[in-house]
């Protein structure tokens, strides 16, 4: 795959000839394969795109170009596409479809689990993103993955393959969450939709937010989806497939303060008041998605060993349980109170 990445990099207008490639963000991204490619006069990030998950690459690329242009116009640091030598932004070869962006120097991933400082900085970067996208016309966004955060549809997909396991039984007791975010007075707006901590880059020197990554799922949605996904990923100790689910309320507060500081006036009170619920719904929804994928034979999320998606599902359900046990405090903190 390294050789394939190097060969594919040669099709892009890189800063000099590509010299070496190394996998990047391994274990963090479950969908595309990403490589850091060193060229004669600089570095790029090269991705082999997952066309099963994103069959409509036209929509993905149209959104990416429009969103990055919008952010650049506001002076917000964002991904910069590197064109191919023949002019477009995608290169197709026998290995698949490739995309290239400039390597963002001077960045680092947030600590795992995040320190209070990293949690606040990453959350602020995501809040800034919401605010910067607030005046982007929502109707101008294409929808590469329909129903991405349609929790009811995710539940029905689970129901169709459900087994008699303890995890499935737990999911059935929480069916009410499938419709919980519907019928609230929240605006449909441009949101990121995949706000896990690993999708934010911090400045290596200062630890402040540097760039929000992974813009492939920017679509119409709810602020509660973005805030909820951040909480389900960042407010707990333990990795995504570890069942230890200690909810850190101080970190939750840092996430809420950072996010609300970034989002500022662009977030309404009704939106804020749904943030705690958003965290529970997103933990539930992702648990359902992992469990469904496990029952379907790991067709969607990349796994390093059999049973990993089941472990990931258990971990999300454990997080949901922890969020429910302390729901009053969670709701108050998430709403900024
Ligand atoms: C996937 O692309 P990546 O790895 O950042 C998934 C998200 C999940 C996340 C869980 C397109 O995100 O929805 O929350 O895994 N992205 C897609 O780690 O399905
Ligand atoms: Mg993603």
Image: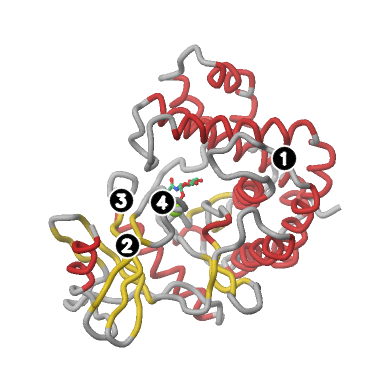
Q: Residue 59: where, in percent of width, then height? A: 34, 57
Mark nearer the N terminus (1 vs 2): 2
Along the line of sight, which residue is nearer the eye, 165 or 178?
165
* Residue situated furthest left in the rendering: 94
Residue in the picture at 63% in, 29% down: 177
Residue in the picture at 59% in, 75% down: 203
Marks 2 and 4, how far apart in space?
21 Å
Badge 3 is on which residue? 50
Marks 3 and 1, how far apart in space?
33 Å
Q: Residue 113: where, in percent of width, then height? A: 64, 53
Disc nearest the viewer among 3 and 4? 3
Q: Residue 103: where, in percent of width, then height? A: 40, 75
User: Dot 3, crowdedness within 10 Å: few (<14), some or many (≥20)?
Assistant: some
Residue in the picture at 27% in, 70% down: 89
Asked if labels 4 and 3 touch by Cβ distance under 8 angstroms, the answer is no
- Report the number of discs: 4
Q: Is residue 15 left or right of residue 267?
A: left
Marks 3 and 2, how far apart in space?
9 Å
Q: Is residue 97 left or right of residue 253?
A: left
Residue 41 seen in the current view: yes
Whether residue 232 is situated above or below residue 167 in the rendered picture:
below
Residue in the picture at 67% in, 46% down: 237
Is ligand 1 less than 8 Å from the beta carbon at label 2?
A: no
Asked if labels 2 and 3 touch by Cβ distance under 8 angstroms, the answer is no
- Residue 146: quadrant of the picture: top left
Judging from the image, what secondary structure is the residue with disc 4 in? loop
Badge 1 is on which residue? 246
Badge 2 is on which residue? 47
Is ligand 1 less than 8 Å from the beta carbon at label 3?
A: yes
């Amino acid at each position: 795959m390294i050789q394939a990445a190097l060969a594919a990099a040669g099709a892009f207008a890189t800063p000099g000839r590509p010299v070496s490639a190394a996998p990047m963000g391994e274990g963090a991204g479950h969908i595309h394969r990403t490589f850091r490619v060193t060229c004669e006069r600089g570095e790029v990030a090269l991705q082999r795109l997952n066309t099963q998950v994103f069959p409509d690459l036209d929509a993905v690329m149209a959104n990416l170009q429009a969103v990055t242009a919008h952010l650049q116009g506001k002076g917000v640091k964002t991904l910069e596409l590197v064109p191919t030598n023949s002019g477009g932004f995608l290169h197709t070869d026998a290995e698949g479809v490739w995309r290239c962006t400039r390597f963002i120097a001077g960045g680092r991933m947030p600590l795992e689990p995040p320190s209070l400082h990293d949690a606040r900085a990453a959350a602020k970067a995501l809040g800034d993103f919401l605010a910067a996208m607030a005046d982007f016309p929502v109707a101008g966004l294409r929808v590469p993955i329909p129903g991405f955060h349609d929790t009811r549809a995710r539940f029905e997909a689970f129901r169709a393959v459900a087994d008699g396991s303890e995890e499935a039984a737990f999911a059935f007791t929480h069916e009410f969450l499938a419709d919980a975010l519907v019928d609230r007075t929240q605006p449909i707006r441009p949101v990121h939709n995949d706000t896990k901590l690993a999708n934010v880059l911090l400045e290596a020197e200062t630890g402040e937010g540097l760039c929000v990554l992974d813009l492939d799922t920017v679509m119409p949605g709810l602020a509660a989806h973005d805030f909820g996904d951040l909480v389900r990923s960042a407010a707990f100790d333990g990795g995504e497939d570890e069942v230890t689910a200690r909810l850190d309320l101080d970190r939750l507060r840092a996430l809420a303060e950072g996010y609300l500081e970034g989002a500022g006036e662009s977030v309404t009170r009704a939106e804020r008041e749904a943030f705690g619920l958003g965290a529970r719904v997103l933990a539930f929804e992702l648990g359902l998605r992992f469990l469904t994928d496990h029952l379907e034979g790991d067709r969607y999320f990349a796994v390093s060993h059999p049973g990993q998606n089941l472990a990931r599902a258990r971990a999300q359900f454990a997080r949901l349980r922890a969020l429910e046990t302390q729901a009053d405090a969670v709701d108050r903190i998430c709403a900024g109170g």
